[in-house]
């Protein structure tokens, strides 16, 4: 049992913080898009930015246990983290643009589906590249 826990110990906090990141992304998107009536793509971008800031801090400290705050380490992690997130953020925007703006599908459903894909891709990047 301990060996199994050790093998997957980063998945538990990643799952928890992934859900919280998704909640932040979703709530900010809904407030911007539905309440403030900001168009779909800018709402998606604002939600993405706030979620990524939250994700960097939680991933660094509590998921992948990167405790170094030396300038070179922090810079490398931040640059690679934000680069990976920009790529998946662009994917999120493209999915939302095609699904909602072009095809007229339900924005809530597609925001959820897009976030699931983004979370999986972000985990792979963080585990094997950013915080290795």
Image (cartoon, rainbow, N blue to C red):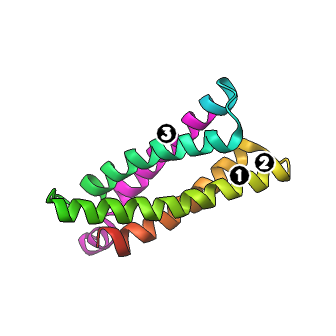
Within 10 angstroms of label 2, few (less than 14), some, or many (20 or more) residues?
A: some
Q: Position of residue 62 (x, y in %)?
A: 27, 53
Q: CA distance from mark 3 to mark 1?
A: 17 Å
Residue at the spot of label 1: 96
Residue at the spot of label 2: 100
Q: Quadrant of residue 46?
A: top right
Q: Quadrant of residue 54?
A: top left
Q: Position of residue 68 (x, y in %)?
A: 15, 60
The residue sitting at 45% across, 52% down in the picture is 18
Indicate whether residue 26 is drawn in magenta. yes
Question: Is the N terminus in the top left, top right, bottom left or bottom right quadrant?
Answer: bottom left
Indicate whether residue 24 is drawn in magenta. yes
N-terminal label among 2 and 3: 3
SS class of the residue under badge 1?
A: helix
Q: Which numbered disc, 3 or 1, marks the residue closer to the eye? A: 1
- Magenta: main secondary structure equals helix
Residue at the spot of label 3: 24
Q: Which residues are magenta?
A: 1-30
Are discs 2 and 1 less than 8 Å apart at CB?
yes
The residue sitting at 63% across, 41% down in the picture is 42
Are discs 2 and 3 less than 8 Å apart at CB?
no
């Amino acid at each position: 049992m301990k060996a199994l826990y050790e093998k997957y110990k980063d998945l538990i906090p990643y799952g928890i913080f992934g859900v919280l990141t998704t909640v932040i992304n979703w709530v900010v998107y809904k407030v911007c898009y539905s309440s403030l009536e900001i168009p779909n793509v800018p709402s998606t971008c604002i939600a993405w930015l706030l979620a990524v800031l939250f994700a960097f801090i939680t991933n660094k400290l509590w998921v992948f246990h990167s405790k170094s705050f030396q300038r070179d380490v922090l810079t490398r992690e931040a640059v690679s983290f934000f680069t990976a997130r920009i790529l998946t953020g662009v994917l999120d925007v493209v999915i939302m643009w095609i699904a909602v703006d072009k095809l007229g599908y339900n924005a809530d459903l597609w925001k959820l589906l897009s976030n699931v894909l983004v979370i999986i891709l972000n985990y792979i990047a963080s585990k094997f590249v950013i915080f290795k």
